[in-house]
């Protein structure tokens, strides 16, 4: 069952794939959050995880989605490089 909203989702548990699709990230990103302990999950098999819907909602409410631009290092950015014509 696709997730429309975690707050109103009827299932008690969601799969990693469902959560990744809902958050628009890769499954690997969800696994990284589970392995780091940031997202609570239960492991049912060697490669089978389920995330409690309430735990996913709690993570979503407290997660830092991105960094502010002013906190990024100043050296990161796109730089235009001009080359003389006729050289490679």
Image (cartoon, grey):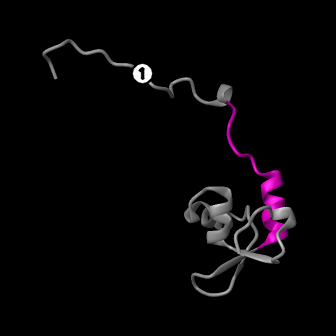
What's the residue at 76%, 51% (across, down)?
63
- Is residue 52 rendered to the left or right of residue 1? right
Residue 70, given in percent of the width and then of the height, sits at 67, 25
Q: Dot 1, crowdedness within 10 Å: few (<14), some or many (≥20)?
A: few
| Count of numbered circles in the view | 1
Q: Nearer the viewer, residue 11 or 52?
A: 11
Q: Is residue 23 above or below residue 84?
A: below
Task: Verify whether residue 58 appears in magenta.
Answer: yes
Q: Quadrant of the C terminus?
A: top left
Q: Position of residue 55 (x, y in %)?
A: 81, 67
Q: Which residue is mark 1?
A: 79
Question: What residue appears at the point 67 percent right and 57 percent down from the top-left corner?
Answer: 23
Question: Dividing the image into 4 quarters, which one contains the N terminus?
Answer: bottom right
Which residue of the protein is positioned furthest toward the bottom in this rendering? Answer: 45
Looking at the image, residue 17 sits to the left or right of residue 83; the answer is: right
Residue 44 pos. (x, y %): 67, 86
| Residue drawn at 66 percent across, 69 percent down | 18
Reply above or below: 23 against 14.
above
Relative to residue 61, is residue 31 depicted above or below?
Answer: below
Q: As rendered, which of 18 and 60 lies closer to the eye?
A: 18
Q: Quadrant of residue 6?
A: bottom right
Does 11 sit left or right of 28 as displayed?
right
In the rendered image, the residue lying farthest to the top is 84
Which residue is at a point 70% across and 70% down the rendered structure image?
2
Instruction: Give the vertical position of 67 relative to 51 (above or below).
Output: above
64 magenta-colored: yes
Find numbered disc 1 in the image and state the secondary structure of the residue it sits on: loop
Residue extending furthest left? 86
Q: Which residues are magenta?
A: 52-68
Q: Position of residue 24 (x, y in %)?
A: 62, 56
């Amino acid at each position: 069952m696709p997730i429309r909203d975690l707050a109103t989702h009827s299932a008690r548990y969601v799969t990693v794939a469902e959560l990744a699709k809902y958050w628009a990230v890769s499954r690997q990103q969800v696994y990284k959050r589970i392995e780091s302990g940031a997202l609570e999950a239960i492991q049912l098999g060697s490669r089978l995880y389920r995330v409690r819907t309430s735990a996913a909602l709690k993570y979503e409410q407290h997660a830092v989605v991105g960094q502010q631009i002013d906190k990024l290092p100043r050296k990161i950015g796109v730089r235009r490089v001009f080359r003389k014509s006729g050289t490679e």
